[in-house]
Every structure is written in C-alpha cells, then in structure tokens.
Image (cartoon, rainbow, N blue to C red):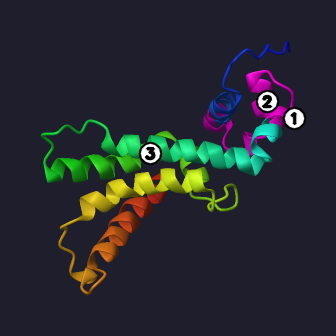
Amino acid sequence: MERKKYHHGDLKNALVQAGLEILEEGGLSALSLRAIAARVGVSHTAPKNHFGSLRGLMTAIATEGFRRHAAFMREGLTEAATRRDTLDAALSGYVRFAETHPHLFELMFSPLYCDLRDETLGAAARDSYRVLSEISEGLDWPGAAGPDRQRRTEMMLWSLVHGYAKLVLS
C-alpha cells in the first residue's frame, strides 16, 4: 500500500479527524497510533509527538465528540423555539448522537480510554452538559426538593437521557 504524503498545515486536527474516521469504521479496538498515522500519511511516531500517547489522542477525539454532541442537542433550534421544542431537541439529539456515533459515545464517557481530568476535554464536556442544565431549569420534579433542587433536577434529566441512550445502544 502506497503511503500518502502529508501536506496538511494542521497535523493535530488531521490526526483527530483520522481517529474519528477509524473509530466510526472499526470501533475502539481499531484505534492505534500506527493506524491513525497511516491514515494521515505520517510516521508512526508523529501522533505521539503531539499527544504523548494513544490515551492522549483518544482524549482529543473525545473532546471533539463532546463538541459534536452539544451541536446535536442544539440542532434545529431557532430563537422562536419554545421550552418544549428545546427540551425535545436536546433529548432527541442526545439519543440520536449515541445512535449515530456509538463508538465515539462510548469513548467520551470512558476513564479507561480518556483522561477525564484534561482541561480541554472538561470544557467541551461542560458545554455539552450545559445544554441539559439549561433545559432542566424550571422543570417540576418532586424528587428534587431541597436547597440543591436545580442540581438534582439536572442529574435526574441527565440520568434519564443517558441511561435511555445506553439502553438503545444495547
């Protein structure tokens, strides 16, 4: 197989995109520094120079996953969207993302594959979670009584949609 010459100006992004492609095609077991480097057409050590390890690259891939996840939950919303429209869009977007990208969804929530303490990953995950947080404001859930009512409502909503998405995948 002839190796492609690499002429891209943004190697880090190219490596993440190649990792996303391989993940979609073959799942988590198909991801390796060698496979990703080969897809981009660079030496097998190039990804390590940018990400330190496969786990570092997987963390970057998961970060992009959270960005896309948030976009799925916001898809189709306009300024005129009602509260119900926003709730429906976010919850259906959450599940649709999991169905469309099951391997990426698994990667995003896995401390086995990702460094969940990574600041960039954390920021992307918080932005994704913010969608659920915003739509949970004002929801009336009797189980959330007490001073931390809003936080408990957020957690209930997240548990519900995340659990449902995992059930759909299984």
| Of marks 3 and 1, the one in the foreground | 1
Which span is picked out in magenta? 20-46
Residue lying furthest bottom in this view? 146
The local crowd at label 1, few if under 14, some if 14 to 19, many if 20 or more residues have their Cα within 10 Å, is: few
Q: What residue lies at 79% left-to-right and 30% top-to-bottom?
A: 37
Please state the horizontal and vertical placement of residue 144, each as a whole percent of the image. Answer: 27, 80
The kind of secondary structure element at disc 2 is helix
- What type is the residue that disc 3 sits on? His
Residue with the mark numbered 2: 37
Looking at marks 3 and 2 on the same chain, the residue that comes earlier in the sequence is marked by: 2
Alpha carbons under labels 2 and 1: distance apart: 8 Å
Tag 1, which secondary structure? loop
Disc 3 crowd, CA 10 A, few/some/many (<14, 14-19, 20+): many
The residue sitting at 23% across, 53% down in the picture is 87
| Left or right of 155 on screen, residue 31 | right
In the shown orientation, is residue 112 left or right of residue 93?
right
Q: Tell me, yes or no, whether the two marked residues, 2 and 1, touch with CB atoms within 8 Å.
A: yes
3D distance between C-alphas at marks 3 and 2: 25 Å
Name which of mark 2 and mark 1 comes first in the sequence.
2
Residue lying at 79% horizontally and 14% vertically, measured from the top left: 4
Task: Mark 3 or mark 1: name the one nearer the start of the chain.
Answer: 1
Q: Quadrant of residue 161?
A: bottom left
Q: Are marks 3 and 2 in contact (CB under 8 Å)?
A: no
Name the residue carrying label 1. 45
Residue 170 appears in the rendering: no
Question: In the picture shown, does residue 145 fall above or below 155?
Answer: below
> Where, quadrant-wise, is the N terminus in this rendering?
top right
* Secondary structure mostly seen in the magenta stretch: helix
Residue type beneath disc 2 = Ala
Residue type (three-letter) at the residue carrying disc 1: Thr
The image shows residue 29 at horizontal and vertical percentages of 74, 45
Checking the image for residue 69, the label placed there is 3
